Image (cartoon, grey):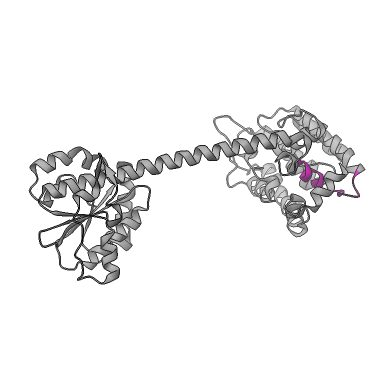
Amino acid sequence: MKSLIELYKTDQESVYHTWFLQSNDRLKAFRTIRKGLLKVIKEIEEESFGNDFKGSSLEFVVTAISEQKQIFEGAAHAFYWKPKLRIPDIYENSQNQKAFGRFLKSCLETTKSEKVLEELRRLDGLKIKGLGPAVANILYFLHPTIFPPFNTAIVSGFNLLYNEKIKLGSWEAYLHMRTKLISENEIHRDSLSKDLGALAGLLFEIGSNRMIIEENAMNFIKNETERFEKAKKRRRKDVKEDEAEENTHSEMQYHLARLGNSLGYKVWIARNDHKREWDFQKLGEFSIQNLNIFKFPPAVADTIALIDVLWLDQNENIIAGFEVEKSTSIYSGILRLSDLSLSIQGGTCQFYLVAPDKREKEIKAQLLRPSIRSLDSQSISYLLFNDLRCDCDAMCKFGNDASILNKISKTV
């Protein structure tokens, strides 16, 4: 145990340094929590406490605890009011609420462990639904030398270090752990502190697998293996999604290019997409090989050449421009089309954002942004993937010019 304590204390990233020795923050928390509890007790006594955790004086107290670094992360969860489960039943049951208030008041007004234990057993005897040993985290900030904090990682560390099997939701288990920790802390008090938070922090580090001991080594390896496997699966899923998006992107360019050609326009596919394929055909086969846009400044010409699909008349004036979006930002696609629109002053070009059906609401919201609506550019319409996919053949057969897109395009 002594060597574990030394390892714990020399690790500059352990909670011993990041939380326990941060005396200013800790001392402020003790004062804040005691002051907050006085308000909780007063409101319960005056029957003005309310019937929800959110916005209550208790939320203020438990938030102050939760903010004490990662060792108390999630401490507030046990006190959230869960209406469907009716837990913890201190919000709508006035008798339970008053009993909780009396418990807090008695614990606040005494310094004797026997008195607190008596109050704790009385509270436990009421069997208030959902009100378990999470309250011990409040007790710690009232009496740090006689009541340790209590959470999943601390319990896990305790079980690993002492080969126990105590459970998280039991007051009996908490009191058993408390007795063991007080005894252990007395042995190593010169190396740790009178404050039980130091020893609880050691258990936290073991239980969260930050400190490796023989008892949790296999757990650490298992967790690391699982984390690695999850990362591999996530990466594999991301790759598949990226491939699917790229294929859909190429498919939409293919439909737009085929439609443009059938309407008698020259088609330009973004220069970096000429080698992409759909339906065993290279997109470059549908595209003119060179885009004559010398009348534009070089920076503008580079932007135009990267638009996903352009339709041009026989004089190579731009008739329509299309940006196909996938998981990329709809806003950035709109900006690219707006930039192109502003560069082609006085033309009759129409611009289209082509996007998945599920992103239609996002498209509408972005097109209604004041910054977009205020742009002195031609209007931007949008096409949905399924509409283009399903109606492309019919438009190729019956369309005469770009106005055929009015049948499926939408504006805001």
Quadrant (top left, top right, bottom left, bottom right) of the N terminus: top right
Q: Which of 347 and 176 is in front in this view?
A: 347
Q: Which of 151 and 389 is in front in this view?
A: 389
User: What percent of the width, then of the height, locates residue 386?
Assistant: 25, 39
In the image: residue 264, left or right of residue 297 = left
User: What percent of the width, then of the height, locates residue 366?
Assistant: 33, 54
- Residue at the (17%, 39%) spot, across then down: 391
In the image: residue 322, left or right of residue 264 = right
- Residue at the (69%, 45%) spot, across then down: 72
In the image: residue 318, left or right of residue 1 = left
Q: Nearer the viewer, residue 205 or 389?
A: 389
Q: Nearer the viewer, residue 235 or 115?
A: 235
User: Is residue 276 something that shows in the picture?
Assistant: yes
- Residue at the (72%, 47%) spot, across then down: 37
Task: Say if 216 sits above or below 42 in the image.
Answer: above
Point out the stretch of residues depicted in magenta.
188-203
User: What percent of the width, then of the height, locates residue 143?
Assistant: 82, 46
User: Is residue 143 something that shows in the picture?
Assistant: no
Is residue 196 on the magenta stretch?
A: yes
The mark tally for this picture is 0
